[in-house]
Amino acid sequence: MASLRPNRVAAIAAASTAAAAVIVIAVIVVMLAPTGCGSTCGSNCPSPTVYIGNLDNQQLSIAEIVVDGPACPPQYGVYCLGDGVSTSCTHVTITGTKQGICDVLVVFRDRPAMIVRTEFGPPIQQGCCKGQTIIGDSVFVIPANPDAGISGVDGGTDAVSIFVDAAASDATSDATGDAGAD
């Protein structure tokens, strides 16, 4: 009669080998797991996005938004957003693609067009945070009142200018007979 002892030893050896393999795989997974964005390092990042819009979710009469500059996102990705329920156009966000400026022309239906100069610095160097640092204001307010202009959230207007269309100015001057007059 054959002894059952060798089968029992083989079964214990196989179970021990399987347990050891599971432990080795677990150790490898822990060692290779990302400690960057898979952890909490991305939970306290500075915003890489400039907000230009109404802070009270009021509908704005914006006809067009045009971006120009080396740090601008592609034009097809820049459009007016709303809350999707009661508004369709309350703000635009600009995320710099590299270091430099991005001029944002906001063409209104109810007031003069304005240009907001946004500026982006070097990449954010905090943990695994992504994006470019923002130089200057990161929030620009567009009041619903058409008599008011765009300003920084603190009221500053250094980065904002009224867009004057030279072709329209020339046509107005020619129609009034003031062209070339000093």
Image (cartoon, rainbow, N blue to C red):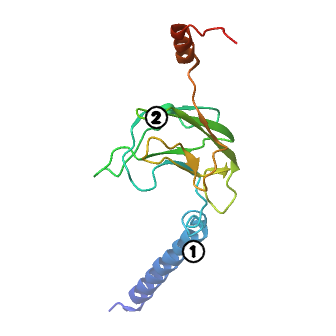
- The tag on residue 111 is 2
Q: State the residue position of label 1.
A: 27
Front one among 170 and 50: 170
Q: Residue at x 39, y 54 (%)?
A: 57
Indicate whether 130 appears above or below 150. below
Q: Dot 1 surroundings within 10 Å: few (below 14), some, or many (20 or more)?
A: few
Report the residue that reaches farthest toward the left.
Answer: 85
Front one among 180 and 110: 180
What amino acid type should be assigned to the residue bearing mark 1? Val
Q: Would you identify the image quadrant in which residue 159 lies?
A: top right
> Residue 171, how many percent across, how many down?
52, 11
> Residue 113, how many percent across, how many down?
51, 32
Left or right, 171 with respect to 63, comes to right
Mark in front: 1 vs 2: 2
Front one among 130 and 168: 168
Q: Secondary structure at mark 2?
A: loop
Q: Residue at x 66, y 10 (%)?
A: 181
What amino acid type should be assigned to the residue bearing mark 2? Arg
Q: Dot 2 surroundings within 10 Å: few (below 14), some, or many (20 or more)?
A: some
Indicate whether 102 appears above or below 54. above
